[in-house]
Amino acid sequence: MKAVLTRVKSASVTVDGSVVGHVDGGDTGAILALVGVGREDSADAWETMARKIAELRILDGELSAVDAGAQVLVVSQFTLMGATKKGRRPSWVDAAPGSEAEPVIEKIVENLRNRGLTVETGQFGAMMEVASVNDGPFTVLVEC
């Protein structure tokens, strides 16, 4: 499992011309989490990923999302699992199929909400337009 976590001033996801998820960073920032689920992920990788999204100190003042009560926008991103070591065309064989990945993304979102965070999402499997105003910019890659 991989995620790109970006501290943002704001971020949104639009599907078919309608905004389906939006976060506003306010004074401390928000987090845009692009999450890719792998075919070979351990059964508890989602728990580690949710903890990292919630607790990494990447917001202004070295605060975590939980510390700051920050909003989080979670977007499923199977392309993060693309293998690019060989050739010019990414291979998607490491990405979990949608039927396996969607419940994992839902578990991450539920875990974050259970921590008291406001969580918005993209639309699984849809062609999404993701917009963000990065803060810093501050972006980290998390692998579980």
Image (tube, rainbow, N blue to C red):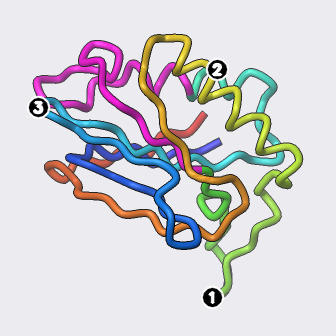
Disc nearest the viewer among 3 and 1: 3
Q: Amino acid at mark 3?
A: Asp
Mark 3 or mark 2, which has the lower sequence index? Answer: 3
Secondary structure of the residue carrying numbered label 1: loop
Residue in the image at 61% along x and 56% along y:
77
Mark 3 or mark 1, which has the lower sequence index? Answer: 3
Point out which mark residue 88 bears.
1
The C terminus is located in which quarter?
top right
Residue in the image at 35% along x and 39% along y:
31
| 7 lies left or right of 74 | left
Secondary structure of the residue carrying numbered label 3: loop
Q: Amino acid at mark 2?
A: Glu
Q: Amino acid at mark 1?
A: Arg
Cβ–Cβ below 8 Å for labels 1 and 2? no
| 118 lies left or right of 128 | left
Q: Which residues are magenta?
A: 50-75
- Judging depth in this view, the residue of 108 and 85 nearest the camera is 108
Whether residue 38 is situated above or below residue 29 in the rendered picture: below
C-alpha span from label 3 to label 1: 42 Å
* Circle 3 residue: 27
Q: Position of residue 86 (x, y in %)?
A: 67, 79
* Circle 2 residue: 47
| 9 lies left or right of 126 | left
Cβ–Cβ below 8 Å for labels 3 and 2? no
Point out which mark residue 75 bears.
none
- Judging depth in this view, the residue of 133 and 61 nearest the camera is 133
Residue in the image at 39% along x and 18% along y:
55
Cβ–Cβ below 8 Å for labels 3 and 1? no
